[in-house]
Image (tube, grey):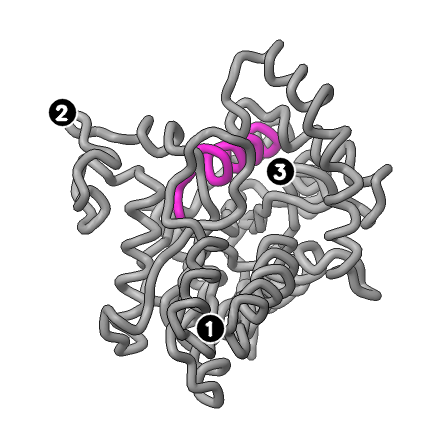
Amino acid sequence: MTPIAPEQGAGLLLLNLGTPDAPTKAAVRPYLAQFLTDPYVVDIPAPLRYALVYGLILPRRAAASAAAYATIWTDRGSPLRFHTEDLARRAAERTGWPTAVGMRYGNPSLRDAAARLAEAGCQRVVVFPLFPQYAESSWRTGVEAAERALRTAGLRPLVVAPYYEDPRLLACLAAQVRAVTDGFAADRLLMSFHGLPVRHVRRTDHSPQPRCLIDADCCATMVDANRDCYRAQCFATARSLAAVLGLPSGDFEVAFQSRLGRTPWIGPSTDQRVVALAREGCRRLAVVCPSFPTDCLETLEEIGERAAAEFRACGGEELRLVPALNSAPQWADAVATMARERLASAAK
C-alpha cells in the first residue's frame, strides 16, 4: 500500500492499557499496583484503596496473575504489547506519520511515547484509544494520562472519540467472526465484553429520574440519557455487529467478564453464561470479545483457556475464541482512516 503524504507535524499515538514486562511475580506486582491504585479503577478513598491493594489484593493476586500470564507469553513477549506495536507499524505505513505506542500502565510509558513523537517533529498528535467503548476505568483514565503526557512534551493532543458503532470497526469484527464460524457450526455466538462495577455505569446516567439498571430496557437503545453508559454502548456494539453478521436475536447473546471483588458488577456474567449454555445443550460455542481490539490476558487466558475448559467440563464440545483485531490489515486501514479524519476535523 502506498503511504499517503504525511500532514505537516502530524503524529499518531496508539493508546492501550498495558501489560507487565515479564510473566513473573516481580514484574506483575508493580504493574498491578499501578493499575489498581488508579482512582478511576478502584474508586474508593485513597487510604482505603492503598490498604486494600497493598494489604490484600497484591499478596493474593500477584503470583496467580503471573502464572496466568505465563500461559499466554510468547517468544515475542506479551501479546498485547507486540500486537499493539505491529499495529503501530502498519498504521504508520498507511499514514506516513510518526507513530508511537503508549501504555496507561507499564511500558512503553506514555511519557516516553510523547518524547519520541516530539523528537520526531510532531506538533499535533492523534490519540487512538484501543478500547471502543467509553468507561472511566479504561477510556477516561487512559486519555487523560495521554493528554497530560503530550501537553508536557509541548504537543497538541487530538483524541479519537469512542467508536463502538463505527462501521469500520464492525466490518473488522465481522470478518474475524466469520473466519472462525464459517468452518465451525456454532450453536451460539457469545459477545463477551469487559465488565464494570455497577456504580461505575450508574455515574453516567444523565436521565432526570435515575433509570440505569432500574429500567429493564435502559440499554435497549442509545439516547441522550445513556450516551456515556459503557453497558449501553456495549449492547449497541452487539446489536450492530449482529446486524452486520445477519444473526437473529436467538443466535447470539451478550455477557460481561473479568469480575473483581465482591461489589456488584454489571451482567449477565460471562463465566456463568458459559456454564449455563453448556448445560442447556449448546455443544459448539464461539466467543468474540468486542471491547478488546487487542488480544491479552482477558481474551487468551480467561476465555481461550479457562472458559473453554469450563465449557467442556459442563458438557460442551468446543469453545472457539474469535481472535481480536490485533494488527489485521483491515483494522490498520480503519485506524489510519479514523486518525486522518480526526486530524482533518481539527482543522475545520
Q: Position of residue 316 (x, y in %)?
A: 51, 74
The residue at which mark 1 appears reads as: 286
Magenta segment:
133-150
Q: Is residue 17 visible?
A: yes
Q: Is residue 259 above or below residue 288?
A: above
Residue 104 is marked as 3
* Label 3, residues with CA under 10 Å away: few <14, some 14-19, many ≥20: many
Snapshot quadrant of residue 320:
bottom right
Circles 3, 1 touching at the beta carbon (< 8 Å)? no
Query: Mark 3, mark 1: which one is toward the viewer?
Result: 1
SS state under label 2:
loop
63 to the left or right of 312: right
For badge 1, the amino acid type reads: Ala
Percent position of residue 276, x then y? 42, 61
Query: Considering only order in the chain, which callout, 3 or 2, is on the residue closer to the N terminus?
Result: 3
| Marks 2 and 1 in Cβ contact (< 8 Å) | no
| Residue at 74% from the left image edge and 56% from the top image edge | 78
Q: Is residue 226 magenta?
A: no
User: At 53% across and 67% down in the image, what residue appears?
Assistant: 314
Q: Identify the main secondary structure in magenta.
A: helix
Residue 86, position as x, y percentages in the image = 67, 64
Q: Is residue 9 left or right of residue 195?
A: right
Residue that mark 2 sits on: 209
